[in-house]
Image (tube, helix red, strand yellow):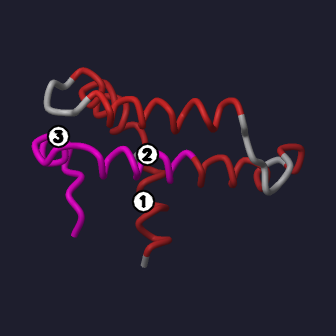
Amino acid sequence: MKYLKRLKFIFTFWRFIPFLKDFFLSTEVTKTRKLVGVGFFLFYVFFPFDLIPDFLAFFGIVDDVVIATFLLERIVKFAPLSLKEKYNLLEK
């Protein structure tokens, strides 16, 4: 079930662009949580861990997508309830 939720998360990524903007501009989100969110992305950008090499076409991208999805899930968990409700990101 967890993997199906991640797959759905990947295919609805476009929803997260406005969410991320609101997350980082919101006064409801503490500066610490914003810094942790930025830290997640910076850590991955500067230390990309490839479990599968990128030259293997589709399969090489899979691990990048999984890590990006994991990072977005963590940021959603940091978000206040009002943002989760606004973007329909409440866990069921």
Report the amino acid beneath label 2.
Answer: Leu
Q: Which mark is residue 8?
A: 1
Kindly identify which residue carries mark 3.
Answer: 83
Q: Looking at the picture, how far across and down is residue 61, in whole percent?
A: 72, 47
Q: Sequence-wise, which precedes: disc 2 or disc 3?
A: 2
Work out how far the residue at label 1 is from the one at label 3, CA to CA, in angstroms: 19 Å
Q: Which residues are magenta?
A: 68-92
Report the amino acid beneath label 1.
Answer: Lys
Verify CB contact (< 8 Å) between mark 1 and mark 3.
no
Is residue 26 highlighted in magenta? Answer: no
Verify CB contact (< 8 Å) between mark 2 and mark 1.
no
Query: For the view shown, which residue lies furthest in the top direction?
Result: 25
Work out how far the residue at label 2 is from the one at label 3, CA to CA, in angstroms: 14 Å
Quadrant in the picture for residue 48: top right
Which quarter of the image is occupied by the C terminus? bottom left
Q: Residue, x 46% and y 30% (percent of image)?
A: 38
